[in-house]
Amino acid sequence: MKKTFIYLIRHGESVGNRENRIRGRFDFPLNENGLAQANALASVMRDKKIEYVYTSPLKRALTTAEIISNNCKCPLYVDDSFCNIKLGPWEGRLKSEIAASEPQLWKTWINDPESLFFEGAETLDEVMDRSLKGMEQLIERHRGKTFAVVSHRGVLKPMLSGALGIQKPRFWRLHIDTGSYSLLTHDDSHGFCLMGLNFTEHLQGIPLVQEFE
């Protein structure tokens, strides 16, 4: 029975995180603190026997992945399956501004995010479907191997929920910090198993923005 080990990594901090903005596909780069988080991640990943790194194409994820790939001396691939949720007209805006200008939609995001839908945006279910399909393709390609996926909160949470069969409402049942990693395994007998969520011990001494909305 071949067990596949998957390290799920959230990118380092960006200005969008620091300023409490909706990120989506707005291409925020890592800030100075995010680079420190990425380098701390790379140090701890060096001993995980990672053979491949896959990443979202957005700069904050791609830069994080490049630092990890270089430290682990393994190939890096960009995969659109793990690009962040598309949030159209919300992207780049302050959360407080959206809450004030579109209170009903913001209330849905806070209380029932899987029901959130507006023109130009993806739903969380759509994100779950595409990211989980991408994950299953990687498992088929690298069965019995160890690889990492660098992505975003808006992808990792629905993808994990789908892998583990967490029922709606599910988005707010998992917490994943910037610069953190989680460990998921897969085998043909048991399917997916979450071995650990939101490891941040490598970030001691590095500021961490807490996001609960």
Image (cartoon, rainbow, N blue to C red):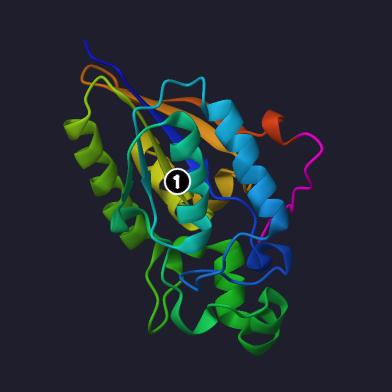
Residue 187 figure quarter = top left
Q: Residue at x 22, y 29 (%)?
A: 142
Which residue carries the number 1 mark? 150
Q: Which quadrant: the C terminus?
A: bottom right
Boundaries of the magenta span: 204-213
Farthest-out residue, right: 205
Residue 4 can be seen in this image: yes
Comparing 126 with 3, the one in front is 3
Considering only vertical position in the picture, is 182 above or below 94?
Answer: above
- Residue 89 on the magenta segment: no
Crowd around label 1: few <14 · some 14–19 · many ≥20 (10 Å):
many
The stretch drawn in magenta includes residue 211: yes
Residue found at x 82% / y 38%: 205
Q: Position of residue 197 (x, y in %)?
A: 56, 32
Q: How many marks?
A: 1
Q: In the rendered image, is residue 179 in sight?
A: no
Q: Is residue 78 left or right of residue 96?
A: left
Task: Give the camera-side residue of 198 and 174.
Answer: 198
Q: Identify residue type, mark 1.
A: Val
Percent x, y of residue 135: 29, 41
Locate residue 136: give its quadrant. Answer: top left
Q: State the image coordinates of residue 185 (x, y, percent, origin top left).
A: 37, 24
In the visual, does 208 lie left or right of 132? Answer: right
Quadrant containing the N terminus in the rendered view: top left
Tell me which corner region of the image, top left, top right, bottom left or bottom right, holds residue 176: top right
Which residue is situated farthest in the top direction here? 1
